[in-house]
Amino acid sequence: MNESPNRPLLIVLIAGIGDLVMASKAMRAIRNGFPDRKIHLLTSTEAAPLARNYTFLDEVIPFPIRELRKKKSFLVDIWRLLLNLRKTEFDVVVNLYQVSSITGAIKMGLLFMMLRAGRKIGHDKNGFGLFVDIKVPSNKYTSLHIVNAINEVAVLAGGKPDDKGIEVYWDKTCEDKWRSLCETGTKGERQLLVGINPGGDRANRRWDVANYAVVAGRIAEQYGARIILFGGPGEENIAESIQQRVKQEVVNLAGKLTLNELTYIISRLDLLITNDSGPMHIAAAVSTPQVAVFGPEDPQRLRPYTSPETYRIVSKTLDCRPCGTDECDHVSCLRNITVEEVFEAAKTLLKAQEK
């Protein structure tokens, strides 16, 4: 199929919330390179609500990847979705994210086989290179920060990068509901808002809830801060465990927020203490100061993509990390992180805001 200046482009990013936010710089570059084209994004159902807030995208197409893991009946929905996508002749189809396994490469390869495009671009790893015309070097995602790696893939697709960072937005209609929570006290006497995000997709990325509870209690006592607990669907028990351990009153919002509401509230925090997770990248995009607790993953590749003055990383140097395993018998990388280390990092950022 030949290229055409009239055909739309399709960005494929079937990944999580944090991955979407990290890809915002690259998607903006693609818009810069194709200012007059329609740009469609195929992303996870989970990330779609935030994606719809990006003005550089014309259409957001949800892909039920997580739903499929729970119910195989979603295969029917996915098949219908692919048949519908096949009706469109795209100029460029680009998979922005890394292919990390042979299984993932096969699945993504089958998807790309269904799509019609003048050019197909993707990661040349685990065999996925067989399904694309322009191949992203296999080491691209290991040698750079993920944001920069994705941005370079966008350039291969014809994108024009800028010197801006990542970005994220929210539906403004949610502000009225939560403004009172974020504006306690009068101007100049506003109570500090400190968010705690103890969850995450995988258990071996979560620092111990008892440690989070101690840190939250110390900050509430020493700074008179209002503590807000976050957590996605299914993480309510994690936040509740912290709430039961903290003597001071906390606001438990776990499982109660839409993605737009979560983003807005994070933007209003004075500090977020979080695991390596989607909310960490949201905080980076809105320049909210944060302490990021890293376990097995590599902070050099996944650190908050923002000004170094606005974040502190707490992690441990071990022979076994970084690693990409989903299961671990000892999780020493997290167990060796102390309450004092996280609390001191939080104090540093809160002190910086007093200046």
Image (cartoon, rainbow, N blue to C red):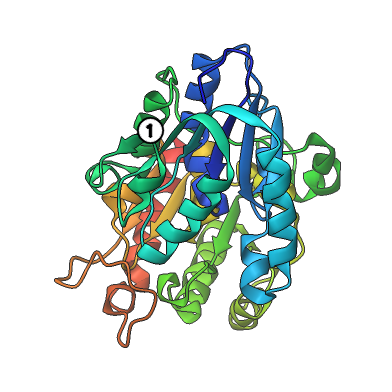
Which residue is under mark 1?
153
> Vertically, is 24 above or below 37?
below
Q: Residue at x 38, y 53 (%)?
A: 99
Q: Nearer the viewer, residue 131 or 253?
A: 131
Total numbered labels placed on residues in the image: 1
> Vertically, is 149 above or below 217?
above
> Vertically, is 93 above or below 297?
above
- Label 1: element kind: helix
Q: Specify few, some or many for label 1: CA neighbours under 10 Å numbering under 14, 14-19, or 20 or more.
A: many
Q: Residue at x 35, y 59 (%)?
A: 344
- Compared across the picture, whether 55 is left or right of 330 comes to right
Task: Pinpoint residue 148: horizontal percent, then vertical percent.
Answer: 34, 35
Q: Nearer the viewer, residue 70 or 325?
A: 70
Question: Residue 125, can we see it?
Answer: yes
Amino acid on which disc 1 is placed: Val
Residue furthest bottom as drawn: 329
Task: Pinpoint residue 298: horizontal percent, then vertical percent.
Answer: 28, 57
Task: Pinpoint residue 278: horizontal percent, then vertical percent.
Answer: 53, 54
Question: Residue 272, can we see it?
Answer: no
Task: Pinpoint residue 283: horizontal percent, then vertical percent.
Answer: 53, 45
Q: Quadrant location of residue 106?
A: bottom left
> Vertically, is 87 above or below 180?
above
Residue furthest front as drawn: 1
Q: Nearer the viewer, residue 287 or 40?
A: 40
Q: Nearer the viewer, residue 45 or 90?
A: 90
- Compared across the picture, whether 249 is left or right of 271 comes to right
- Compared across the picture, whether 285 is left or right of 153 comes to right
